[in-house]
Image (tube, coloured by chain):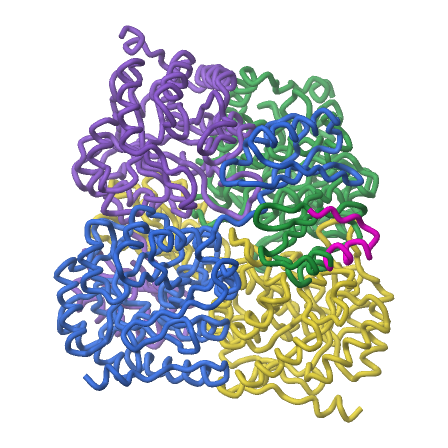
Chain colours: A yellow, B green, C purple, D blue
Amino acid sequence: MLVVMRMDASPDQIDGVVRRVESHGLKASPIAGAQRTAVGITGNLGVVEPGLFESLPGVLEVIQVSHPYKLVSREFHAEDTILEVGDVKIGGRDLLIIAGPCSVESYEQTLRIAETVKASGAHLLRGGAFKPRTSPYSFQGLGREGLKILARVREVTGLPVVTEALDIDVLDDVAEVADIVQIGARNMQNYTLLRRAGQCGRPILLKRGMNATVTEWLLAAEYILDQGNEQVILCERGIRTFADHTRSTLDVAAIPAVKQISHLPVIADPSHAAGQRDKVIPLARAAVAVGADGLMVEVHDEPDEALSDGNQALLPGQFVELMEEIRLLASVLDRQVPSQASQRSL
Amino acid sequence: MLVVMRMDASPDQIDGVVRRVESHGLKASPIAGAQRTAVGITGNLGVVEPGLFESLPGVLEVIQVSHPYKLVSREFHAEDTILEVGDVKIGGRDLLIIAGPCSVESYEQTLRIAETVKASGAHLLRGGAFKPRTSPYSFQGLGREGLKILARVREVTGLPVVTEALDIDVLDDVAEVADIVQIGARNMQNYTLLRRAGQCGRPILLKRGMNATVTEWLLAAEYILDQGNEQVILCERGIRTFADHTRSTLDVAAIPAVKQISHLPVIADPSHAAGQRDKVIPLARAAVAVGADGLMVEVHDEPDEALSDGNQALLPGQFVELMEEIRLLASVLDRQVPSQASQRSL
Amino acid sequence: MLVVMRMDASPDQIDGVVRRVESHGLKASPIAGAQRTAVGITGNLGVVEPGLFESLPGVLEVIQVSHPYKLVSREFHAEDTILEVGDVKIGGRDLLIIAGPCSVESYEQTLRIAETVKASGAHLLRGGAFKPRTSPYSFQGLGREGLKILARVREVTGLPVVTEALDIDVLDDVAEVADIVQIGARNMQNYTLLRRAGQCGRPILLKRGMNATVTEWLLAAEYILDQGNEQVILCERGIRTFADHTRSTLDVAAIPAVKQISHLPVIADPSHAAGQRDKVIPLARAAVAVGADGLMVEVHDEPDEALSDGNQALLPGQFVELMEEIRLLASVLDRQVPSQASQRSL
Amino acid sequence: MLVVMRMDASPDQIDGVVRRVESHGLKASPIAGAQRTAVGITGNLGVVEPGLFESLPGVLEVIQVSHPYKLVSREFHAEDTILEVGDVKIGGRDLLIIAGPCSVESYEQTLRIAETVKASGAHLLRGGAFKPRTSPYSFQGLGREGLKILARVREVTGLPVVTEALDIDVLDDVAEVADIVQIGARNMQNYTLLRRAGQCGRPILLKRGMNATVTEWLLAAEYILDQGNEQVILCERGIRTFADHTRSTLDVAAIPAVKQISHLPVIADPSHAAGQRDKVIPLARAAVAVGADGLMVEVHDEPDEALSDGNQALLPGQFVELMEEIRLLASVLDRQVPSQASQRSL
């Protein structure tokens, strides 16, 4: 932490800051500049807040230097974390492709789409049983019935399943069925849910909140790791900005930014960012090109009849096209889209 | 809903849209303009999504016209809702003042501050027992112990209590103690929590999420009203923008915007918006002047020792000053800051 | 400037930073913390950019500490600057009210509105002769013809005039007529225009850019002061955010933030922030309550026929109401809305 | 335009809207829905503003339907515009690579970097002679001296030159030297400059303003086309958001969004978006993958000594790497990075 003094701060005021620092068992290092003095603070900063110093006489501002995350950081864990879900490796050279409908609507619909995306090369099936909807009057998902459908579809197709745990009440049921438990963007700072996710024994797909900085996102992941679960996949899905040509603004730069700080894998969800079918493939390409470890995309074979988000779902033919483009990109980016050998053998 | 056709859309393409509309049991009204045609859609629009039409040939864009909220809307309930909490009326001419520490830290601290803010005219005591913290390593609140402290302090001071329910696990315990249950900004789209809040039998203070539009905020309230609980107070607490001189940007215009659409009372939290003590009073004045029905402010008598957010807490002397300024403002805004007759008589 | 080292930075890497600092004639002060070292840099930092150090081995990040503005700052000029335009004082206890149409449309319209707002107590007349319009097909203002109209209306009414200089070509002509020259939000970083404004011999009203931080806004003012013109009035007019219930988000907190750092007066433009007539008065009240030194509002007596921004113009009766509300607010905020003694005597 | 009535609007109020519409020579088409009526308006909407109807009794809101741009739109000009600058084609299958220093600092520096980027395959040289700087105390560019240097370097290297025209005073001089005249992000709504750019006889590179929607950006281009200059290249360079891990947030989705609406070529500037060297290459890849028609990147061989933005400049070796990666990407995206046959033959 650095306390910047006003230009006209008196020696007494600087001393006042030093004394306050030392009274909290910390060390103060005044640095006299040409125009003003700053006081560096070192020691166990976990116990102090900037407010301790901001209101002292002569202080201009307080700058926080230390980064609050630990377990998610490369400074604590230098090597990339590579998760294994079935035969799928997440976070290494392989590009992970998760695809499926926005919502599980019926066994037939889910199975049909699962088979379609599997045939095109997807590694995991996505599908929401519990849906967070802005309006209470929108379709809220099939709930536990949806989980049962996902379990049956996995049995038939061999595709591992990602689905969202909307709250702590359903987390255990979701974790029983899901190969990866998703925490959605709206729940990124639902700390109770994060802690339970850290205890649920499943890999967690943690979406970035629409107004979360990279630091806040990593701290949300830290809640999960802090409970002993290091199996966390981050997912960039767009942030809220003034731009109105897409539903959210896909912040592709967050992907290399996170990978620089953290060892966790990061994938992208171009479907929710785009909000419109025709922007999904370009955004998917951009995410892979920037360095994402995979994609999660929505696919529906009858999007006009979908019960949620139909207009951002790729048609099956478009998903085939996406897979082809991603395989080509992977080939020049020193990555690969693995085939699903094991699942096929089922 | 309005489907806007491209300038070069053919009559067949316009017919295609009309047929699609009618196939969903809706009525289509084509409007031919100088340059392009638009097709108005009427009927029960709850069942259709824009995606139904966006991908049809010749369509330029689809514009949603109808507003999705109902129960919160003045179109359904024209008169201002006025809540009563003890002797306090919320939403009429009276200005509601909620004050207290960010966190309940101990019985002594909470009682001391409660007595201080009561003496200065606050109507309710705030204080967090369960604290949502960005970092897992920050103080997370005293939990149920904090609730007990709040209950004792209310008994002694007669001040009704507002405190946050962080998740559905603690909601019932919070509702047992709290006179008003707070749903925090990070939980504004925690729909399970909203629904339960709609069933808990207590008035709910619903903070605006940092990236929520007014529509999304009102729809979050709609979740609560939809469960039969019409006792909702909205609270503007700042949105996330690029501006870095305050922690959040207090969007004062949201207050008249909400009051125009909705009958629910709206208060403001200048403390979290400011993030710094010296901006709290000016923002409090602005919120009252713009038309807020009250304020929620943080007060601490030893902010440098506070376990959370000490640097945004007003000192007791500053809270006295705030109350004086608000009373003066109220006098010229045709409002009043009621005295706490009944509580004093305890 | 502070260079924060990685936790695993070697002593050699720290030395490397120190040597780089010293090679630029600056002083390096390493501060060893519990987990990492930071290197404070002092001296004439004007000559260095963070990039000098960011790419050195072992560096985690570089934090800029010093504030780049000087002349606008209270550290260089502690007392409030008070401008005098005719008999109007700007920046002291007096609240300045600028009112008038968005655009000068004709002599009759401008005179009529000028007389109306003068009768209600406005101190200056606003009115655009040169209009920045998003679309090339919108009305662009009467240009120099508009300036002549403003000059005639000033002669008749005695009201000093504020009007925008859209570019350096028209600046001199504007400065000849205008009592205060406005630099609009879109031109806040038009540095050539700012420099010329600093040489034009007139007070400058500098609107905040829609994406400008307070620091950038103050640096734009610094361009003007740096040319010897200390007569600058800042004007908050709303920033661009995701919020869609007003045209821009009036950032009221920017007003006390600027006044804390700078000695310059700050007013607010609630009309452009609101974008709708019915939000203008509440926002005007908020701006005055937060501490603005005045208001600039749009008034039109036939807003439906206005050639620009008619829907945000107050009707004359609403302006009377605004003035009454502001006078009442001023009375409890230790400010006053001065009467226009001198102009009336014309 | 669509006027949406309140649910409780009376038939008289609907009639009132219809009469107002017709009094302006427009046609009104009321559409009665289940809950409310909307009135479609057709005719020459250029003459009316929403405010005409917003304040009428019974009106809930007014929605603008028509798009204000024309010449930039695919509805007016369906085929991609392909510019030719020397032998370089911009906007077709070819990917355009513009590279060079942020600022022209000296003849030697500019020549050295120009030769370096040419050797690696750049098609045009960038380099600022006039620099827009946030602080008046930062290096402002060499001015006309810088233009002379660019002219000499072009003569020697054969590389066409892009450089910024900061204001209308220097536009003609810039246009005399530059093969492409750049309008910077801060000037995107400097309409006088845009109009003159439309008359200057040179292709224009128009950067997106940091707070500009796609519509506003296209309307800025419309100002240029409206003056008869159809040679416009758009450049996405990042928008301002709350995200703080890059200087601006590169809005890659804007590229396909613009290309869908407009026939103009769109390139990306990953250097200004990133603000840090190590994010430039990933963002460049993302921009090309999303569909950009080219890149503009900053390269410096002594970035630590650069007079501006040194920390975002690629080193020459990194630029080689970038070119290799872009060539590989082009090969799988059905695009190509053309070699500079003609220039080499000089």
Q: Quadrant of the N terminus of chain D?
A: top right
Which residue is at 22% across, 38% downward? C197
**Position in image of residue B109 (x %, y %):** 60, 38
Decide which of B172, C279 is in the foreground and name it: C279
Q: Is residue C16 above or below residue B147?
A: below
Q: Is residue D88 above or below residue B90?
A: below
* Number of numbered discs on residues: 0
- The picture quadrant where one finds residue B136 is bottom right
Q: Quadrant of the C terminus of chain D?
A: bottom left
Q: Is residue B187 above or below residue A214?
A: above
The reply to whether residue B317 is visible in this rendering is: no
- The residue positioned farthest toward the top in the image shown: C345
The reply to whether residue D191 is visible in this rendering is: yes
Which residue is at 48% across, 55% downward? D214
**Position in image of residue C8 (x %, y %):** 40, 75
Which residue is at 69% across, 41% downward? B218
Decide which of A221, B9 is in the foreground and name it: B9
**Position in image of residue D313 (x %, y %):** 30, 70
Q: Is residue B208 left or right of residue C35?
A: right
Q: Is residue A223 left or right of residue C283?
A: right
**Position in image of residue C129 (x %, y %):** 33, 32
Decide which of A217, B172 is in the foreground and name it: A217
- The picture quadrant where one finds residue B220 is top right
Q: Is residue B22 magenta?
A: yes
Which residue is at 60% across, 23% downward? B121
Q: Is residue C134 above or below residue D273?
A: above
- The picture quadrant where one finds residue D149 is bottom left
Magenta residues, as a range?
B16-30
Q: Is residue C113 magenta?
A: no
